[in-house]
Structures are given as structure tokens and as C-alpha cells.
Image: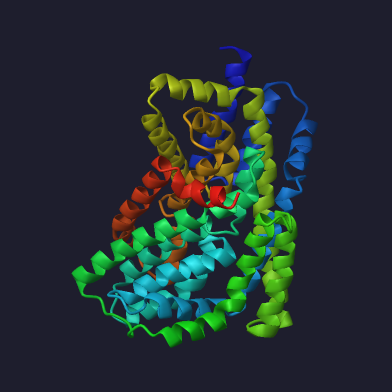
Amino acid sequence: MDANTMAIAVLLGSFFIMIFLRFPIAYAVGLASVLCLLSMGNSLNTVCQYMVKGISSFSLMAVPFFITMGVLMGSGGISEKLIALANACVGWMRGGMAMVNIVASYFFGGISGSASADTASLGSILIPMMVDQGYDADFSTAVTITSSCEGLLVPPSHNMVIYATTAGSISVGSLFLAGYVPGALLAGSLMIGSYIISVKRNYPKGEPFSVMNLIRQLSVSFWALAAVLIVVFGVVGGVFTATESAAIAVIYSLIVSVFVYKGLDWKGVWKALDDCVATLSIVLILISTSAVFGNCLTMLHVPDLAANAITELTRNPYILALLLNLILLVLGCIMDMAPIILIATPILLPIATSIGIDPIQFGIMVVLNCGIGLLTPPVGAVLFIGSAIAKQPMEKVVKATLPFYICMIISLLLITFVPAISLWLPSLLG
């Protein structure tokens, strides 16, 4: 075994051993990188240099701002207003509260950009409300956790910023635009699945549709939805960079939460900022250690080796696209979202582009695959949050989620094989 092969074995072997031993992912990534560099005879000073370089990016400054914006808006009483707006839109249908859950996640995801925040905020309100109206608890939880993945696709999503930075030379604004139609597709497929189950189980309808009620709820929710307009249209229109728009959105969110909706006082603001620091510390440690891991992969030519190994299996682009999705889905079962994006993107993106998948389309595929991973054991963070909120056994929630997995996989396949779903809106707006 030559030195290069030995270093690859040390890097990947130690990483997966620590993953299965349930090490925190940041420690697993960092320690595996250190062991690899030591086996190659490199100085540990290299680790510090790569870590600093990994987070010394102007684009990555948008990530803390987007997370702060989501926490402020989520803590400021936005959830109830978005639920009321969703109820005015779709609550009249059979299984109306399930439809409200899905549509509210689409709205709220555009503010928080986080599936975990969506599940925690909306789930704590909607799951008990659905159970009180006669919906099964496991069904209510399944709807909540699967619809929360819409927030990963609908901008502003800090995971898309991480992908754009990792992939390089990709417009954050184009990625933001590319997420709207796939997010709507996912919402539509989940609504179809919910409707079929609701008819079968005879779940109740909501109040009849009212245009005046819809207009009233839109006027109340406008201030919350305007935060997304500031970010998206500011970036796409070239008025701001992604980082500048994120900073402006934080100031706007603070004003709306404290002075307009009055859901936060200044004590609540400090608590929200404290929560932000806890979240950001995890994200930035992951990014910095993953930068070291990524540099190790590059030095050892792992992306080239992986590309050659996968393409040797088959030259059929459709099968290769399915293999890429399968790899990402398997990784999602054992790793969290950010490290998958940081580690897998440099390896899999060249393969995707070689079979004609646009980098922006591939970004949407990566994000949705990782979102499905958040719902699958053993490392399904959103699955655990939903089960804890509903006080339901994880096994029962997983069983109730099976029909929605099918809806999500159908959406994923459509996004994979119909590029226009992701690329139409960015192409239309240039």
C-alpha cells in the first residue's frame, strides 16, 4: 500500500469509525483530518491555517446574519400570523389543518431557512391543534417534519450560501431563485399525499374560503413576508450582496419583532441573540473543520478517484444521476446537513456536471437530499425534534412518514430529471 492510499484509508477510516461511535460530527471531521495530515508528515500548523481559511470568506458572513434573522423572526410572534395566513389560503380543504401546516412551512421557511426551526416553532403550535381537531398524532407529526424541508429550498436558506461557497463561482441570487419552484413542487406533492390520507381517514375540513379573510391576513403578515422580499430582490436586483442583504434583514427583523408585532421585548432579544451564538458556534466549527477535511481530500485526489470509480460503473447519465442521489441519501442517514454539503460537494459536483447537470440544479438536489436525511434515523435531527414535541415514539412517527417519503422522492426525481424546475426562474430573471 503506497503512502497516498494509506493516507486516504486513515482519513476515511477514522472518520467513519468516529461517526459510528457517535462522536460529534465536528470532532470526527477535525480529528480525522489531523490523523491524515500526521500520517502524511505535515505540520499541525497546517490544520490551523486551513481552518482560518475555511471561514475567512465574505460570502460566509451571510450565514450568521441569516440565522440571526430567522431566530429573531421566529421568536417575535411570526408563527401565529403565518398559520392564520395559511389557514385563509387552504384551510377550507379536506384535511385543512394538514394543508395549513404545509403552506405555513412554505411561508415560515422563507423567513427562518431552517427545517429544525420550522418544526420547533410551527410544530409546537400546529401538532396539538391538529390532535384537538381529530387528527392522529403520528400523522400530524409526519406532516410537520416533512413540510419543514420546504424551508431548506425557499430562500433565504443559509445552507444554499454554504453550498455556493463550497462549489465556487455560483451566484447566491440564482440559487435563491432556483429554490422557489422546487419548494412549491415539494409542497404540492405533500399536499396531494395529505389529501389522499385525509379523505381515507375522513379528517375534517376547515371554515369556507373567504377572500376578505385572506386579504386581512395578508395585510397582517405582510411585514413578515417583506423580509424575504428584501433579501431576494435585493440580491437578484444587484442592490446588495448576499451578506449585505442578510445584515439589512437582521435590522429589519429586529424592528418588526420588537416594534411592529411586539412579540419580543429587549430581554427576549438578548435571549434570541444568545441562541444565535450557540447555533453559530456549531455551524462555524463545522465549516472550519470541514475546510481541513476538504483540503485533505483534494491533496489526496479523492474527488478524481471517486469520479473515476463511479463513472466506471456505468456511463448512463440517468443511472449516474440516481447514484448521486443515492449517495447523498445514505450520507443524510448518518451525517448532518452542513458537513454533507461541505464534504460531498467537491467530490460529487464534477460528476454531476460531467453528465450535464447544472451546478445550480445540483445544489437544489443536494439540499433536498440532505433535507430527506434530516427525517431519517439514526441522525435525523428534525425527526427527533418532531417526536419530542408530539411526545410520540420515533418508530411510530417513521411509520406515519412513509407515504410522505414517497412524495419527497417523487419530487426529488422530478427535480433531478427535469432541469427546468430548478433553472426556469433564474433563467427568466437573468
| Left or right of residue 170, residue 410 in this image | left
Quadrant of the rendered structure where residue 72 is?
A: bottom right
Q: How is the image coloured?
A: rainbow
Q: Residue at x 39, y 78 (%)?
A: 128
| Left or right of residue 277, residue 225 in this image | left
Tell me if residue 298 comes above or below residue 186 in the rendering. above
- Of 20 and 415, nearer the camera is 415
- Of 217 and 26, nearer the camera is 217
Q: Residue at x 51, y 69 (%)?
A: 107
- Of 305 and 316, nearer the camera is 316
Tell me if residue 235 comes above or below residue 412 in the rendering. below
Quarter of the picture containing the N terminus is: top right
| Left or right of residue 54, residue 124 in this image | left
In x, y percent, where is residue 351?
Answer: 51, 29
Tell me if residue 178 comes above or below residue 349 in the rendering. below
In x, y percent, where is residue 82?
Answer: 50, 76
Q: Residue at x 78, y 38 (%)?
A: 48
Residue farthest along the top direction in this orientation: 2
Q: Residue at x 31, y 52 (%)?
A: 406
In x, y percent, where is residue 390?
Answer: 40, 71
In x, y percent, where is residue 21?
Answer: 51, 42
Q: Is residue 131 visible?
A: yes
Q: Is residue 393 visible?
A: no
| Left or right of residue 8, residue 190 in this image | left
